[in-house]
Image: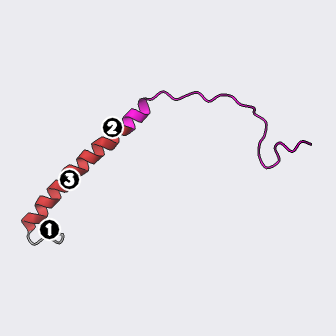
Amino acid sequence: MARMGHSTARAALICRHASVERDRVIADAVSGLVDKGRKKPRKAKKKQDRKHKGHEGGRGD
């Protein structure tokens, strides 16, 4: 195992273990936000004027 810049393999393992735990906390938090976002009811879009409003729309011809 590479020491990842640490002076000993033990120090590298300690750092790696801490990183894995922190990654799990972050992943769980993001997952919770995604689940919360999916549970929100979507607002129905109002049917607006369906007149074409592209580059030629509203020319007044």
Q: Is residue 37 magenta?
A: yes
Give the labeled residue for mark 2. 32
The residue lying at 77 percent from left, 42 percent from top is: 53
- Residue 27 lies, in percent from the top left, at 29, 46
Say which label, 2 or 3, has the lower sequence index. Answer: 3
Residue 4 picture quarter = bottom left
**Count of marks, rendered view:** 3
Q: Report the span colored magenta.
A: 34-61
Residue 20 is marked as 3
Give the labeled residue for mark 1. 1
Spatial distance from mark 2 to mark 3, Cα to Cα? 18 Å
Q: Is residue 28 magenta?
A: no
The residue lying at 48 percent from left, 27 percent from top is: 41
Say which label, 3 or 1, has the lower sequence index. Answer: 1
Left or right: residue 29 versus residue 7 is right
Residue 10 is marked as none
Above or below, 43 relative to 1: above
Q: Secondary structure at mark 1?
A: loop
Colouring chosen for the image of the structure:
secondary structure
Specify the amino acid type for callout 2.
Gly
Say which label, 1 or 2, has the lower sequence index. Answer: 1
**Label 2: few (<14), some or many (≥20) within 10 Å?**
few
Left or right: residue 6 versus residue 39 is left
Above or below, 3 relative to 52: below
* Chief secondary structure of the magenta portion: loop
Marks 1 & 2, CB-CB < 8 Å contact: no
- Residue 17 lies, in percent from the top left, at 15, 55
**Label 1: few (<14), some or many (≥20) within 10 Å?**
few
**Label 3: few (<14), some or many (≥20) within 10 Å?**
few
Q: Secondary structure at mark 2?
A: helix
